[in-house]
Image (spheres, rainbow, N blue to C red):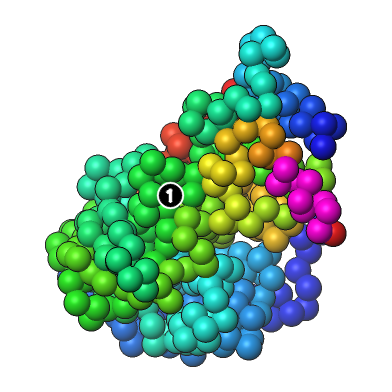
Amino acid sequence: MDFSYSDEQKLLRDEIVRFAQQELNEGIAQRDREQIFAPELWLKCGEMKLPGLPVPEEYGGGGLDALSTAIALEAFGYGCHDGGLAFSLAAHLLACVIPIWKFGSEEQKHKYLPGLCNGKIIAVNAMSEPDSGSDAFAMRTRAVATPDGLGFRINGTKTFSSNGPVADLAVTFALTDPEKGYHGGVTTFLVEKGTPGFRSSKKWDKMGLRTSPIGELVYEDVYVPASQVLGKVGAGSTQFTHSMDWERACLVACHVGTMERLLEKAIRQARTRKQFGQTIGKFQAVAHRIADMKISLEAARLLIYKAAWGLERSRMVAIDAAIAKVFGSEALVQTALNTVQIFGGYGFMTEYEVERALRDAIGSTIYSGTSEMQRNIIARWLGL
Amino acid sequence: MNEIKKIVKDYILEEFLPGEDPAGLADETPLVSGGILDSMATIKMAAFLEKKYGVQIEAHEMNTKNFNTIASLASLVQAKLGGK
């Protein structure tokens, strides 16, 4: 494994950082306060092909390998101060675009991927339900084949669906054979906005990631033709697991970018803020805290690069993705806490943005599988 | 075929049934419906077979029909090796 950047990866990183800093950060405090999702910024990201980074160019994507995708998302997390936008975009890419690219028919890929990659179609991953979070496959949403065999009728409710309130396409998981359950009983459907019986209902208010809309999706006798089945009937569990490997390995790449930005802010503060006649960075209590932030950043980056590198190589990447996810998300929370602490009273004020970074960070140990579930996965791979 | 069954059985005993009597695990013992292979164990099983035999198991193939017994797992691997 050689993780030194190629010239192309350096250019990619610089370009994304510059784009994000110039185009995405204005007005973020207000958008956060008022929970505003900005479609115009999403479209700008689409012009950069950010919503489709690894998708082959023939489908309108960026054609990047998985490691370069992680590097690009890291750059996005560094340059984009809007944690909600970064989260929405990563969720769209990793939990929706990836499964369509990897498992969709040619017809589905040509129909959806160009719009998903250029920002004109926003997608939501519809898995979590009111009674099934970590125990995702205990879902109640059912899809029953119609008597003529030409389609399915879906009934159920999904919740905590990121991008749900603004999505044009829902990558929907439903039980087609409750007896089989995980083993061939779950099927993935592509449900378009406007399909009769399908609607977005409750929109949740959130502590952080407030510019990323999240809500409930309701399916009331929703008819979808068989052509909207992603891949084959019964393949949903494995498709979901595969996309979670991508999400766990690459979503935390955004965190690394955010951690690096926070580290730089903390260093600047420690080198300029004076108390008791010297800069606060001269106090070991502060310096050690910053040193710990640097250790976490470097360790998280390597874990994430290793997991991303493995995405296209082995199903065994699941353990590396779980390790990267649990370490990267917990490191992000601790880094954000450290930054607030180093900024002191200023860190507690919204004006300095570090409190928002902390609020945005808290969810990271919950979404895409809680830290507890990641540790369960790691333990199982170790034979426990 | 018998060699594949033996390797699959040894792997299951080692990974998912440590300390159990090997005689209690037969070729037709239900693995999925019997609770030996849950979701995580199924992925580990697939990863093991893919690495061991250099085959690729598709998403729709990770079902009860293929994963419920040592015999069906061995048949799946055999079919893939034969198709190479």
Which residue ends up furthest to the front in the rendered image?
A148
Q: Is residue B67 left or right of residue A177?
A: right
Which quarter of the picture shows residue A17? bottom right
Residue for point 43% across, 69% down: A229
Q: Secondary structure at mark 1?
A: loop
Q: Disc 1 marks which residue?
A: A185
| Overall secondary structure of the magenta section | helix
Is B23 in the magenta? no
Locate the C terminus of chain A by quadrant: top right
Q: Amino acid at mark 1?
A: Gly
Closer to the camera, B82 or A332?
Answer: B82
Please state the chain letter of the residue tagged with numbered disc 1 in the rendered image: A
* Residue drawn 82% across the image and 37% down it: B1
Residue B24 occupies which quadrant of the picture?
top right
Q: Nearer the viewer, residue B14 or A63?
A: B14
Residue A313 visible from this viewpoint: yes
In the image shown, does A138 or A346 lie closer to the viewer?
A138
Query: Residue A116's x, y, as percent?
Result: 45, 81
- On screen, residue A310 versus residue A26, left or right, reads right
Task: Give the answer, above or below, for where A86 lies relative to A327.
Answer: below
Question: How dense is the environment of label 1, judged by Cα within 10 Å: few (below 14), some, or many (20 and up)?
Answer: many
Quadrant in the picture for the N terminus of chain A? bottom right
Position above or below: A298 against A225: above
- For the magenta stretch, what is the residue range? B75-83
- Residue drawn at x 37%, y 73% is A150
Viewer-nearest residue: A265 or B20: B20
Tell me residue B13's x, y (percent): 69, 21
Query: How many callouts does the rendering have?
Result: 1
At 41% from the left and 43% from the top, the residue drawn is A181
